[in-house]
Image: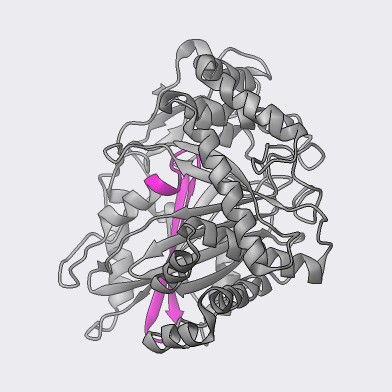
Amino acid sequence: MQRISPVDAAWLAIESRDTPMHVGGLFEFTLPDDAPQGYLGRLFEQMREVRAIPPPWNLKLLDVPLIGSRLPVMRQSHDVDLDYHVRHSALPHPGGQRELGVLVSRLHSNELDLHRPLWEVHLIEGLEGNRFAMYTKIHHSLVDGVSGMRLIIRTLSGDPAQSVTPAFWTVGGGERPKAEEHSAGSGPLALPLGLLREGAATAGGLSRAALDLALAAVDDRSLQAPYRAPASALGGRLGGQRRFATQQYELARVKRIAAAFGCTLNDLVLYLSGTALRHYLAEHAHLPERSLTAGIPVNLRHASDQSMGTAIGIMVAELGTNVANPIERLHTISRSTDEAKRHLSHLPPEARTSYTLLVNAPYIASLMLGLGGHAPVPFNVAISNVPGPTEPLYMNGSRLDSLFPLSLLTHGNALNITCVSYAGTLNFGFTGARDTMPHLQRLAIYMGEALDEVELAVLGKRARAGARAVKRPKPARAAR
């Protein structure tokens, strides 16, 4: 048994029917040409035959409730009911992207059972084009995007002829970060106090960062301070139902545009997201006069760190949604991210996790006190870029064609945009609150238009036509 760290406990503390705190992934495969009849049925049987299940897949909360006492305790379960956790679904004919998106949206809307290990996997057959899908979800207290991606990569193979166990939950992670006993305390403020104590342990390294943020809050600088996000349609309280949409682009195309402009790939991801949001809000709601801000997770792990749990920092940057000219908008974003990186670079490595805890502690406290959607938020929308495998992967001959991330939402943040690179593609997943984000698939379409627009502005007509002649990107893949 083990008490978990305050940052991982935070995801459990704010879990609710309207804000389930799990993350997920949609993996689409093409069956091998020589797949026998009953291939998927046998695959499903193999998935449920596994008996040795390591952490984090066998971790179970020792007790619920989660708020009002000490930090939660996890223990390993040696009797994981795979008949419950592993499920088989079939799409109605014709099994296109829309039907898949409707099913995944519903599955992602449902809370995990906090009395069982905190994950589910759904094998989905019936996709047109000789394809099938797997949707998986796991609580964010167990993994973040980077550690979750590592688990998946270790399950699949780069060799289509290699036989593998078709189950993510056969691969365990490293040790989880542990909570010190004195950081927990008791009472309704146990978790916020644990966050603050953990942050205060490296207060010496945080003073310069605090001064930077204080100046940014009162001065019109490129550095964006948290909790200055303008009011927008993305705020307010959320219902529990979700929408999900996807987009996929050729990675080389996006990198070519970024290189021609002289910005990073992350900057261009922010540009595409901000431009799509600018169009979406102008059409469906109200576009704020001040720029929307993005919370950008930063991986704090060393390359050798294989631990589970959450190990991310946070940057806040402008999205340039108040700038009409696309080139000026991209310049605005690039300047803002440069300032955010400079700001984080002044922190010693050991203080960066604490900095993130201190920034988020007021927001987490407001959620725990029932003030979510009414209190200020650190930023308008979370936007993540997670590096994935560079070469194609296979599961017993079935090629992984795409992997789309799904994320969590909290009161005040009705949208999450996360992308994952994979085998020469960049795969975007849009997770939105159903009642707040109508017609979410249009946001995905607007992103495709934003890519065309910036490509034309940066490369020009002739260069863009040449780039398209090399390889046409896949069409918009959007699902409600």
Give coordinates of residue 459: x percent, y percent: 50, 77
Q: Tell me which segment is drawn in magenta.
A: 118-147
Q: Which residue is painted at 26% across and 48% down in the image? A: 51
Q: Is residue 278 among what the camera can see?
A: yes
Q: Is residue 243 among what the camera can see?
A: no
Q: How is the image coloured?
A: one colour
Give coordinates of residue 139: x percent, y percent: 50, 44
Residue 146 covered by magenta stretch = yes
- Which of the 4 image quarters holds residue 476? bottom right
Give the side of residue 469 with respect to residue 45, left or right.
right
Please tell me whether the stretch drawn in magenta is mainly helix, strand or loop: strand
For residue 117, above or below residue 84 = above
Count how many numbered circles sit on residues in the image. 0
Residue 132 covered by magenta stretch = yes
Q: Which residue is painted at 28% across and 69% down in the image? A: 392
Give coordinates of residue 99: x percent, y percent: 57, 78
